[in-house]
Image (cartoon, rainbow, N blue to C red):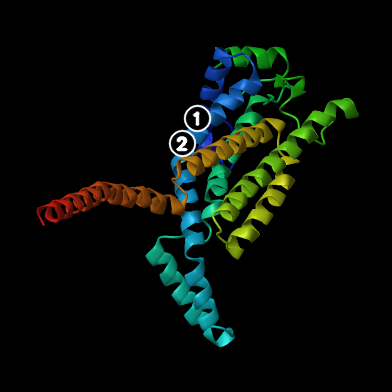
C-alpha cells in the first residue's frame, strides 16, 4: 500500500520518492534521526544554487543602497509614489537585484516541508481496523518492519519524532527535548540572519529596510509551525539551517559575495605592474649616474 486518499493524493508519487530515499538511508544507518539528516543533506544540495544566487542578490541589493536613497530623497511625498516605484523597479532591473531575495531559500523550503510532513504522517498510517501500515516506503524495507513492530513510533535519541511538542509524552521531562529542538530551530534561523548582518557591518554596508523586516518576521512565523508539526520535520529545519549557515560562511570567506574583493584583487595587479616598472626606473637612474660620472672624469 503506497497511496493515500485526499485532495493532495496526486502528490503521492513524490511522497513515494521521498519515502523510498528515507528508507534507503535508514537501511544504511538504522536510525531515523540520521536518515532524516541524510535526506536533508540531499535536499539542501539541490537548493544550493538557489542559496548562492540569493546571497549574491542580497549583496547586490546592499550595493545599490546609495542610489536607492537618492531616488527616495528625490521623489518624496505621496504624489511621487508611483514615479518612485517605477524608478525603483528600473534600478532593480538594471542592477539585477531583488529586494526579497533573502527569503527565497526559506520559501523554497516550503514544498519540501509539506512533502516531508505528509511522508511522516504516512509512516504512522493506521488501517480502518487500527493496524499500523506505513505508506510511501517499500514493504520489504527495514524501516517498514521496524515501524510495524513499534506501532508507528519513529524512535531516535529517546524521542518519538512523529510527535509534536504539545502531544502527550508521558511526562514533562520527556517533552523537554521537543521544545529544545524548536528553540534550536528558531535560534539557528536568527543566527543565520545575524551572520549576514555582521558581514554587512564589516564591509560598511547598510541593510535594506525590506530585508530587515523579512529577517524579523520569518523566524517568528516558523516558530508557530514548529509547534504544530512533527519533530521529524523540525529536525529537518534544524539541519537545513545549519547547512545554510555553513554555506553562507564559505561564500563569505571565498569572497564570492564580498563586493570589495574585486577591488582588492585589482590592487595587487596594479602593485605588480608598478613593481615591474620600478626596477626599470632604478636601472635607468643608475645608468644616468654612471654616465654623469664618466663625463666628469673626461672633463
Marks 1 and 2, how far apart in space? Answer: 7 Å
Q: Quadrant of the N terminus?
A: top right
Q: Give 274 or 66, whichever is nearer the viewer.
A: 274
Label 1: few (<14), some or many (≥20) within 10 Å? few
In the depicted structure, whether residue 30 falls above or below residue 65? above
Where residue 212 appears, as percent x and y from the top left, is 63, 59
- Farthest bottom residue? 79
Q: Secondary structure at mark 1?
A: helix
Q: Is residue 135 visible?
A: no
Q: Secondary structure at mark 2?
A: helix
On screen, residue 199 versus residue 89, left or right, reads right
Q: Is residue 97 visible?
A: yes
- Farthest left residue? 298
Residue at 68 percent across and 25 percent down: it is 124
Q: Quadrant of the C terminus?
A: bottom left
Where residue 213 appears, as percent x and y from the top left, is 65, 60
Where residue 142 appears, as percent x and y from the top left, is 59, 12
Q: Which residue lies under the disc numbered 2?
A: 46
On screen, residue 31 versus residue 257, left or right, reads right
On screen, residue 124 versus residue 173, left or right, reads left
Q: Give 242 or 153, whichever is nearer the viewer.
A: 242
Q: Give 32 or 48, whichever is nearer the viewer.
A: 48
Residue at 45 percent across and 76 percent down: it is 86
In the depicted structure, whether residue 269 falls above or below residue 159? below
In the depicted structure, whether residue 78 falls above or below residue 66? below
Q: Is there a contact, CB below 8 Å, between mark 1 and mark 2?
A: yes
In the depicted structure, whether residue 166 falls above or below residue 210? above
Q: Which residue lies under the disc numbered 1?
A: 42
Residue at 88 percent across and 27 percent down: it is 173
Amino acid at each position: 500500500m503506497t497511496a493515500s486518499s485526499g485532495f493532495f493524493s496526486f502528490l503521492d508519487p513524490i511522497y513515494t520518492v521521498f519515502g523510498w530515499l528515507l528508507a534507503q538511508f535508514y537501511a544504511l544507518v538504522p536510525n531515523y534521526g540520521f536518515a532524516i539528516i541524510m535526506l536533508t543533506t540531499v535536499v539542501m544540495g539541490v537548493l544550493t544554487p538557489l542559496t548562492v544566487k540569493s546571497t549574491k542578490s542580497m549583496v547586490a541589493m546592499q550595493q545599490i543602497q546609495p542610489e536607492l536613497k537618492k531616488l527616495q530623497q528625490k521623489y518624496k511625498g505621496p504624489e511621487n509614489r508611483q514615479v518612485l516605484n517605477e524608478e525603483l523597479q528600473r534600478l532593480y532591473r538594471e542592477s539585477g537585484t531583488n529586494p526579497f531575495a533573502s527569503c527565497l531559500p526559506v520559501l523554497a523550503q516550503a514544498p519540501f516541508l509539506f512533502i516531508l510532513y505528509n511522508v511522516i504522517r504516512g509512516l504512522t498510517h493506521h488501517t480502518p481496523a487500527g493496524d499500523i501500515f506505513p505508506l510511501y516506503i517499500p514493504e520489504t524495507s527495514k524501516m517498514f518492519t521496524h515501524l510495524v513492530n513499534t506501532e508507528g513510533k519513529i524512535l531516535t535519541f529517546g524521542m518519538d519524532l512523529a510527535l509534536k511538542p504539545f502531544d502527550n509524552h508521558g511526562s514533562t521531562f520527556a517533552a523537554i527535548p521537543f521544545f529544545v529542538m524548536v528553540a534550536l530551530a528558531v535560534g539557528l534561523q536568527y543566527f543565520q540572519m545575524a551572520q549576514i548582518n555582521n558581514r554587512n557591518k564589516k564591509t560598511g554596508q547598510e541593510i535594506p529596510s525590506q530585508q530587515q523586516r523579512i529577517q524579523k518576521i520569518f523566524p517568528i512565523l516558523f516558530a508557530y509551525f514548529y509547534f504544530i508539526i512533527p519533530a521529524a520535520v523540525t529536525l529537518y529545519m534544524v539541519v537545513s539551517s545549519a547547512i545554510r549557515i555553513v554555506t553562507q560562511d564559505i561564500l563569505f570567506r571565498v569572497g564570492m559575495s564580498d563586493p570589495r574583493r574585486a577591488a582588492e584583487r585589482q590592487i595587487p595587479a596594479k602593485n605588480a605592474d608598478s613593481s615591474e616598472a620600478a626596477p626599470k626606473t632604478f636601472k635607468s637612474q643608475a645608468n644616468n649616474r654612471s654616465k654623469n660620472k664618466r663625463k666628469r672624469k673626461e672633463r
